[in-house]
Image (cartoon, helix red, strand yellow):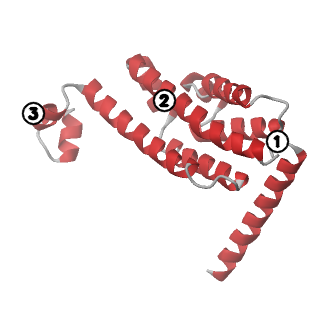
Amino acid sequence: MDDLAADLGMSKKTLYTHFSDKVALLEAVLLDKLHDIDTDLERIASRDVSIFPASLRDLCACLQRHLEEIQPSFLWDIQREEPDMFMLVQTRRLDMVHRYFGKVLEEGRKAGLIGKDIPANLIIEILLAAVEAILTPQKMKKMGLTPRTGFLAIIRVLLRGVMTEKGRERMSHYRERRTLYGNRRSLEG
C-alpha cells in the first residue's frame, strides 16, 4: 500500500479512506475490469450479428485485448492469496462466455453456419469446460500459454468442430477479404 500511495501521490491514510485493506482495493480493481469487459462484450453482442464471422471475430478481439493486460503470474497470485477473488473472476468470466458467445453461436446456427447436430447449450458447456480446465495459472504455466493464446486456441479448435461446411467457407472467405483489405490499407498508408 505504501508503494501504491506513493505512485498515486497521496498518503497511505488517504488511500485507506477509500479502501479498508488490500483485498478491498483488489476487489475494486477486479470489479472495474470485469465491468469494462462486460460493457465491451455487450456492445459487440447487441449489434446486428447477422454477419457471423465479424461478430465472432470482434468478440474474440475484445477478449484478446482485455486478456493481454492480465499476466499469468497475477492470476496465480490471486488464486493462491485470495481464492474468493479468483472465484469471482472465474465465475464472471464463465458467465460472459456463456452469454455473449452463446448469442453469437445461436445467430451462426440460424444462418446455417453452425451445425444443428450439437445443441447450442452443449457447445457452450464444452467451451466453458475447456476454458475452466486450460485457463488456470498452473496449466498456462505448464503449457507456456498466456490467457490470450490459450483462449484463442480453444475457440479455434471448438469452432472448427461445430461449423458447417458453409460456415468454414464463409469464415475462410471472410479471412481472405480481411487479409486483402488489410494489405491494401498497408500499401495505401
Is residue 80 rendered to the left or right of residue 155?
Answer: left
Q: Position of residue 52 (x, y in %)?
A: 71, 51
**Front-most of residues 21 and 7:** 21
In space, the residues marked 3 and 1 are separated at their CA atoms by 56 Å
Q: Residues within 10 Å of mark 3 (few under 14, many from 20)?
A: few
| Amino acid bearing label 1 | Met
Report the disc number at residue 115: none
Residue with the mark numbered 3: 13
Q: Position of residue 124 (x, y in %)?
A: 68, 30
Q: Earlier in the sequence, mark 3 or mark 1?
A: 3
Is residue 23 rendered to the left or right of residue 135?
Answer: left
- Identify the secondary structure beneath mark 1: loop
Is residue 127 rendered to the left or right of residue 24?
Answer: right
**Front-most of residues 82 and 128:** 128
* Quarter that holds the C terminus: bottom right
Question: Which picture quadrant has residue 156?
Answer: top right
* Quarter that holds the N terminus: top left
Q: Position of residue 34 (x, y in %)?
A: 43, 37
In space, the residues marked 3 and 2 are separated at their CA atoms by 32 Å
- Identify the secondary structure beneath mark 2: helix
| Amino acid bearing label 3 | Lys
Comparing labels 3 and 2, the label whose residue is closer to the camera: 2
Residue contact between numbered discs 3 and 1, judged by CB atoms under 8 Å: no
- Residue ranking furthest to the bottom: 188
In the image, is residue 97 above or below residue 47? Answer: above
Q: Earlier in the sequence, mark 2 or mark 1?
A: 2
Residue with the mark numbered 1: 163
User: At x 60% / y 47%, what residue is drawn?
Assistant: 59
User: At x 27% / y 31%, what residue is drawn?
Assistant: 25
| Amino acid bearing label 2 | Arg
- Residue ranking furthest to the front: 110
